Image (cartoon, grey):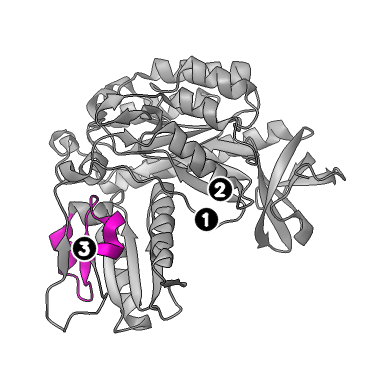
Amino acid sequence: MKKVAFYTLGCKLNYSESSSIGRMFEDKGYTKVEFNENPDIFIINTCSVTENADKKCRKIVREAQKINADGYVAIIGCYAQLKPKEISEIPGVDAVLGAAEKFRLVELIDTFEKAPSGQPAQVIASTIDHAVEYHTSYSLNDRTRTFLKVQDGCDYPCAYCTIPLARGKSRSDSIENIVKAARDIAARDVKEIVLTGVNIGDFGLRNGVREETFLDLVKALDEVEGIERFRISSIEPNLLTDEIIEFVAQSKRFAPHFHIPLQSGSNKVLGLMKRRYKRELYTERVAKIKSLMPDCCIGVDVIVGHPGETKELFEETYHFLNELEVSYLHVFTYSERENTAALAIRPIVNKGERAERSKMLHILSDKKKRFFYETQIGKEGKVLFEDEVQNGQMLGFTGNYVRVAVKYDPLLINETKEVRYDHINAEGLMEVTEIHEEILTH
């Protein structure tokens, strides 16, 4: 049978979906290989979050053609849904599939035979209102950690975002099916599951009707045997309820780690962005988490250079974050998107100023992370070690997302050990001097 390879751009959600589609190919008898192993079929799963989506897609197609000029190239993902015609005109592309079609890739394209030169690419992409089905997906590329999709789509019309246009309305699978998927993952000796989706706090909608809640899901997953640690990838502050925080604080398996999008520390800019909260709510959420879990790691998404963000309003964001008890920042530089409300907002921030603001927040993030790590020195925690080696050391994460480095030992791979944090090394990793003899997973 033919060999198939995947290249995935973008978020954890895309990785979970690529992995699941890859298993569909394997179930049909195809052999899944690496991108550079001369595959017969190249599947490129695209992202639309950055302005370089087009450049990245074109570059990967060119690389695929270098590897195998006769290889069949299919493009899926958010960018494929938003710009199918544009992608179909990229030399070397054979097929473009939209959000409603990508999970039917194996059945929609029979032979995967490359079309004669000059023949246009096949476009199989419905309008986004056809993307109503939910497909449970999870990645299995890493024995230690799996990304489990629990929700798809978004009903929030944020001014800067095209995701509702690329993925459709918010929808979820049932808790029963997701728990089954978690048990299947546990049977593969995976120790940590990261819950992912577009807007996971909105979990529970099926056909536009709320049947379950994210809190219901968290409680059910907390009972899944065989998984040591669940991690919530990202959750909107207005959907992160006191009840969720309180449950995680006393749960058996959920990690003391939240990633909470803020996007701006200015209420005026939040209003322009059409976000559903003010910064005061964000402050309350952080305070609640820290009151129950003082060592909890809190990550923040923030966008710089959004239209309407004056120098003074950016400084509001900077000072707000500087005072906030959070652990690190994910900084995104605003980029224009077709069919978004942000295009009509003034004033526009020039790209040089956007870059400068991004640099300032990256420096602040480094300081926040360093300070958080320093608060952990002398304490103990459980580390899940990964099959990753840097400079003779292997790496792992604690439950509260501290990156730990120890001397390489193959017996530690995919094992949880209790350690005492000693000092931060030159690479910014936590080093440990004591590892308890008992392996906690057995």
Q: Secondary structure at mark 3?
A: strand
Earlier residue among tags 1 and 3 = 3
Q: Amino acid at mark 1?
A: Leu
Q: Amino acid at mark 2?
A: Ile
Q: Residue at x 22, y 54 (%)?
A: 98
Depth check: give the residue in front, 371 or 110: 110
Q: In which quarter of the view is residue 206 placed?
A: top left
Q: In which quarter of the view is residue 202 placed?
A: top left
Local packing at callout 1 (Cα closer than 10 Å; few below 14, some 14-19, many 20+) is some
Per the image, the residue denoted by label 2 is: 185
Earlier residue among tags 2 and 1 = 1
Task: Determine whether label 1 and label 3 are within 8 Å by CB.
Answer: no
Question: Over which residues does the magenta segment extend?
Answer: 83-108
Per the image, the residue denoted by label 3 is: 96
Q: Residue at x 40, y 47 (%)?
A: 13
Residue 70: percent from left, percent from top: 29, 84
